[in-house]
Image: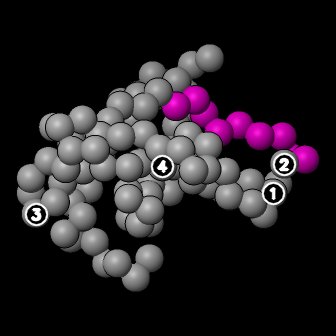
Amino acid sequence: MPVDTIVIRVLEKGKPLCNARIQLKHKFIGNYLALPALGRYFYTNCSGYIVIHLGALNYSKKAEPVEKFYKIFVNNIDTGVRVTSTGSGLVHFIEIDLSNLNRDH
C-alpha cells in the first residue's frame, strides 16, 4: 500500500516533549475512528518526535459521510491540527507546541 510519512514533533514551551501520547482521529459514518485504536497511543521519543506511515483515506461512497483528514490529539487534547495522506510518498512535517494551543478545542 502506498503511504505518506507523517513526522510529528511535540514541544512544550519550545522544548521537546518526551512520551507525549499521540492519536489520530477522524469521523467515519458518524463515529470516530482512531489510529492506533481508541484507548491506545503512539508515544513521542525524547526528542519529541513520532513517525507514522499513513495510507490514503479512500472510502467508497457507501462509507459516507467520512472526514478526509485526521485530527491530531496530543495527551487527549484536540490540537486543531489536521493531517491527511495522499498515499503518494510525500513527507509531512508537523510541529505542535502545546503551550501555544487554545485548550478550548
Q: Is residue 98 above or below residue 40?
A: below
How busy is the neighbourhood of tag 2: few (under 14 within 10 Å), some, or many (20 plus)? few
Residue under pointer 1: 29
Q: Do the residues labelled 1 and 2 touch (CB within 8 Å)?
A: yes
- Determine the CA span between mark 2 and mark 4: 22 Å
In this view of the protein, can residue 19 be seen by the observer?
yes
State which quadrant residue 7 falls in: top left
Which residue appears at 21% of the width and 44% of the height?
A: 18
Q: What element carries label 2?
A: helix
Please report contact status of discs 3 and 1: CB closer than 8 Å, yes or no.
Answer: no
Q: Which of marks 3 and 2 is nearer the N terminus?
A: 3
Residue lying at 75% horizontally and 60% vertically, measured from the top left:
31
How much space separates mark 4 and mark 1, taking CA atoms? 19 Å
Provide residue 41's location: percent of width, then percent of height. 47, 44
Q: Give the range drawn in magenta.
A: 54-62
Q: In this view, does 87 lie to the left or right of 98?
A: right
Work out whether residue 8 or residue 58 is closer to the camera in this orientation and state it: 8
**Residue furthest top as drawn:** 1
Going from N to C along the chain, the mark reached first, 1 or 2, is 1
Under mark 2, the amino acid is Ala
Compared to residue 12, the image places residue 89 above or below, namely above
State how far apart marks 3 and 1 are (Cα).
Answer: 37 Å
Does the magenta segment cover residue 9?
A: no
Instruction: Please name the residue that numbered disc 2 is placed on.
Output: 63
- Residue beneath disc 4: 23
Q: In this view, does 60 lie above or below 77?
A: above
Q: Can residue 9 be seen in this view?
A: no
Residue 90: mark: none
Query: Amino acid under label 4?
Result: Gln
Q: Which residue lies furthest to the bottom in this view?
A: 104
